[in-house]
């Protein structure tokens, strides 16, 4: 398929309705133009996904790839406590990509946006051919109150380290898909539907991020994209504090534990290393964790689990299980290459 | 060279000073955060450059490729009458890229920014491996007064069509480089230094774009990236007007005319088709062209040349030379593939 036909699809896709009060100028001029909300800070992030490095069409449909590309960008805005508003989507397409595949990619992005009930306008992008793998690059712009920006560097000694939702499923899902790659019997995967879905179509925590940021009791936040251990260390180093994580406290579903058993891996290790979870990891005033957790359960249905404490920098980074105290290392997620 | 070493370079590169009053958060957290200027509209653009499609290392150094990638994005902001402020730079790098090459790429971007005396902060980006060609993707964010945004769609019947600087050199420069590719004697290119420089290191017209937008007498504007004929048609279709272009009025330097003779091509055709000129094409109140041209010459040293008129939609698109009236077609620049 040639590029001009893609261009047509790309333009049609961009007829997704935009917010007319904020978007002064959408696709079709030299730049887009938007009107920032007075008093708000702009949050800007970009993430690029290269076929063979960041996604594998052996495991994911193009819809799932589109969903996950958008989810990763949305999760970065969520981790700052922000609301995503404007996206620019760039595609580098080799000749072999079909119109159906590109439609699927766009549909996946749209579905993720609709699934979490966001109003993201696609205001621009670019399209190029490539003699090589498909490249998807998204830039996402959001807003938040400047005083509510949740950085990695605000953790305070005594804070509880907390995490939204459950951990380990993304990595377990990927390993299950790899494990059964050669096996025609797909029913082997049926008991692990939620775990695999978490790998293929993760849901970023925008509403939860807003709730945490608005509370005023959260001091540092990050999304789990590299893995709990790596991302915890980002907070630790960024805030110049130590961390103590309790292995027994990690929220892992019964299904993910069963998957770990099937895969013959330690579920705690899975939970520590699993990347692209897109859960939020934050440090909270210890007196406020319970009320915040109950508010989150009420408003979004998601759990907020304390998994450790912020300690003095001199105490370093540790994780504790029934065997004793261990050094916390950045053994997070590595891309499947 | 492996990616983590590149990552190091990438991070060092990003230590370019940022404007602390506007940039709340630069590289190193989940997103960047900036404070928009109250009352201003945001302009957002993104352009991607794929090795083998958009650039060719046989003709350009990595510095020149970096310069031109940034210039193309800056030119889009200039075409709206805006001021570029924040950039995100994404690189997909195959294993064969060396640290020197990537340094050169970044140096080229910086040199362009410094050359036109802009204060652009690099606030983010992404880095990935790729089993394929080098991909450079830049997102650029700027600001302008909402009432000064210069769209393609504002041209009025009776306006003069004007262009900054000179035309044809970018395409002539490329053809000279292609022409002499097999010839070891580089001195053949010496008489055409300015023409070749325009192809390799074009200068976007930010100051000129601001002057034109601020004047209030310019009704539509676009940058010449596809070629004069194509981009004029963009204004024509966008504004629902006709256009009449005078071939004899096109500003072409004596050097570019000499290059056209060497290449045995019609200089007017070159000027009509040459893409990536990054000059500004605009339509102006006919009574104000002279004073605007003299103000631009005073303030920036660049020429502003009337090359035609905006006519009624029913009169269509034409260009006129000594042989008569011809149909204006989108025969602009095609990528060298």
Image: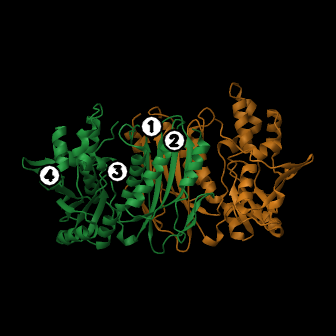
Chain colours: A green, B orange
Locate residue A54, reporting x and y percent: 39, 42
Locate residue B3, reporting x and y percent: 39, 39
Viewer-proximal residue among A86 and A10: A10
Name the residue tied to disc 2: B135
Secondary structure under badge 1?
loop
**Who's the residue at 44% across and 47% down the image?**
A48
Task: Give whichever of discs 1 and 2 has the lower sequence position.
Answer: 1
Task: Give whichever of discs 4 and 3 has the lower sequence position.
Answer: 3
Q: Which mark is residue A247?
A: 4
Marks 1 and 2: same chain?
yes
How many residues crowd mark 1 within 10 Å: few (<14), some (14–19), many (20+)?
Answer: many
Secondary structure under badge 2?
strand
Disc 1 vs disc 4: Cβ atoms closer than 8 Å?
Answer: no
Q: Quadrant of residue A83?
A: bottom left
How many residues crowd mark 4 within 10 Å: few (<14), some (14–19), many (20+)?
Answer: some
Chain of residue at mark 3: A
Q: Which mark is residue B130?
A: 1
Residue A23 appears anywhere in the view: yes
How far separated are the C-alphas under marks 3 and 1?
A: 23 Å
Disc 1 vs disc 2: Cβ atoms closer than 8 Å?
Answer: yes
How far separated are the C-alphas under marks 2 and 3?
A: 26 Å
Viewer-proximal residue among A62 and A185: A185
How many residues crowd mark 2 within 10 Å: few (<14), some (14–19), many (20+)?
Answer: many
Quadrant containing the C terminus of chain A is: top left
Chain of residue at mark 2: B
Q: Which mark is residue B63?
A: none
Name the residue tied to disc 3: A201
Locate residue B113, reporting x and y percent: 58, 53
């Amino acid at each position: 398929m040639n590029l001009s036909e893609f261009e047509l699809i790309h333009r049609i896709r961009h007829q997704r309705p935009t917010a007319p009060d904020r978007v002064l100028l959408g696709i079709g001029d030299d730049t887009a133009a938007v009107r920032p909300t007075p008093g708000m800070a702009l949050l800007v992030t970009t993430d690029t996904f290269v076929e063979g490095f960041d996604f594998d069409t052996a495991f994911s449909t193009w819809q799932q790839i589109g969903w996950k590309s958008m989810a990763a960008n949305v999760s970065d805005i969520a981790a700052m406590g922000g609301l995503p508003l404007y996206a620019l989507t760039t595609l580098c397409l080799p000749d072999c990509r079909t119109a159906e595949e590109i439609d699927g990619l766009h549909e996946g992005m749209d579905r993720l946006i609709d699934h979490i009930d966001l109003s993201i306008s696609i205001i621009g992008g670019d399209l190029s051919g490539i003699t090589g793998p498909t490249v998807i690059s998204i830039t996402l712009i959001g807003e938040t109150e400047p005083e509510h920006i949740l950085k990695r560097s605000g953790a305070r000694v005594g804070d509880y380290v907390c995490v939204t939702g459950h951990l380990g499923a993304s990595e377990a899902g990927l390993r299950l898909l790899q494990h059964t790659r050669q096996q025609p019997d797909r029913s082997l995967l049926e008991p692990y539907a939620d775990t695999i879905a978490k790998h293929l179509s993760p849901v970023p925590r925008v509403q939860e991020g807003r709730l945490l940021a608005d509370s005023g009791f959260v001091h540092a936040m990050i999304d789990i994209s590299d893995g709990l251990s790596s991302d915890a260390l980002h907070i630790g180093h960024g805030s110049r504090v130590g961390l103590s994580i309790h292995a027994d406290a990690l929220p892992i579903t019964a299904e993910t534990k069963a998957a770990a058993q099937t895969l013959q891996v330690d579920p705690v290790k899975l939970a520590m290393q699993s990347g692209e979870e897109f859960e939020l990891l934050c440090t909270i005033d210890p007196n406020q964790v319970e009320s915040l957790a109950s508010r989150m359960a009420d408003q979004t249905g998601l759990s907020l689990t304390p998994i450790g404490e912020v300690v003095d920098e001199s105490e370093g980074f540790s994780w504790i299980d029934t065997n004793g105290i261990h050094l916390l290392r950045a053994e997070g997620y590595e891309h499947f290459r």
